[in-house]
Image: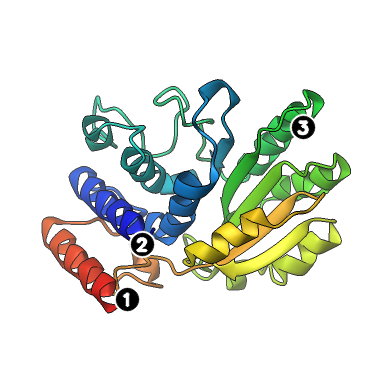
Amino acid sequence: MNKIAQNIRKNILHIANLAGSPHIGSALSCSDILTSLYFNVLNLDDYENRDLFILSKAHSAMALYSTLHEKGLLTKDEMAGYYQNGGTLPAHTDRFTNPYIEISAGSLGHGLPIATGMAHALKLKESDRQVYVLMGDGESQEGSVWEAAMLAPHLELNNLTVFIDRNDLQGYGRASEILSYEPIDKKFEAFNWEVLRIDGHDHDAIQKAVAFKTNKPKMIICDTVKGKGVNFMEDKLIWHYFVVTDEIKEQALKALEDSSNEK
């Protein structure tokens, strides 16, 4: 799993460099969550009966594209067309660009409400399919998130699992200082969710949290580090915006390799 996550991070650095795009820190932050989901959790073998994954923090689209490529669901050429004029993939997800991209997203706070509707529809059909959502922590400041948070337990959506990528950095600073959401675990518990808090870079912990049995919708709060894997990017706000030049790409790939060798 660590090797797969490493490859996904390399893919992210590659397309960020090709495109000259921002949001590298946000994409690196959630790579381990996506690795665990796509390679150990999601049932994708039967497309019509597949589990559904919603990337609500769609500014991290590079992480999803890189994961889909590593999974064999997106070609190298398609991935290389990210954020290019006349290219294949936009900066934020567009559901018409790939069969495994479930929603068009970008404006934050929409993923959980959409996923709640999907999970409710599947329950009405008595389907075994599961719905998974990845949100950002800054995104949890949106009112639409809390409307869905009230509704999901009321509808008894035990087929809904939500991850919060809690790296505590959003566009203008520390999410917990801009508009504090803590104690976020207690807040979701008060809304009658099953809440687990884990290390969002620990693949075993992620899989165990997903496997935890409950009759409630599940919230998995993942404590993560923005820019994870590249030491000079870790927990630095500037990597919400800075682009990956050729020089930075080489430095970042070396940092990734060094961090891998230390494990």
Look at mark 2 in the image and give the residue it sits on: 2
Of the two numbered discs 1 and 3 in the rendering, the one whose residue sits closer to the viewer: 1
The residue sitting at the bottom extreme is 262
Residue at the spot x=38%, y=71% of the render? 236
Q: Nearer the viewer, residue 191 or 59?
A: 191
Q: Quadrant of the C terminus?
A: bottom left
Residue 141: numbered disc: none
Report the Cα–Cα distance between label 2 and label 3: 34 Å
- Helix, strand or loop at disc 1? loop
Q: Are marks 2 and 3 in contact (CB under 8 Å)?
A: no
Report the Cα–Cα distance between label 1 and label 3: 42 Å
Residue 224 showing in the rendered view: yes
**In terms of sequence position, does the residue under pointer 1 or pointer 2 come before the other?**
2
Of the two numbered discs 2 and 3 in the rendering, the one whose residue sits closer to the viewer: 2
Report the Cα–Cα distance between label 1 and label 2: 9 Å
x then y, percent, for residue 59: 44, 47
Residue 2 appears in which quarter of the rendering? bottom left
**In terms of sequence position, does the residue under pointer 1 or pointer 3 come before the other?**
3
- The amino acid at mark 1 is Lys
Look at mark 3 in the image and give the residue it sits on: 120
- Helix, strand or loop at disc 2? helix
Q: How is the protein colored in the picture?
A: rainbow
Residue at the spot x=72%, y=53% of the render? 218
Residue at the spot x=78%, y=64% of the render? 187
x then y, percent, for residue 57: 52, 48
Query: Relative to residue 41, is residue 203 depicted above or below?
Result: below
Residue 67 appears in which quarter of the rendering? top left
Look at mark 1 in the image and give the residue it sits on: 263
Residue 164 appears in which quarter of the rendering? bottom right
- The amino acid at mark 3 is His
Q: Are marks 1 and 2 in contact (CB under 8 Å)?
A: yes
- The amino acid at mark 2 is Asn
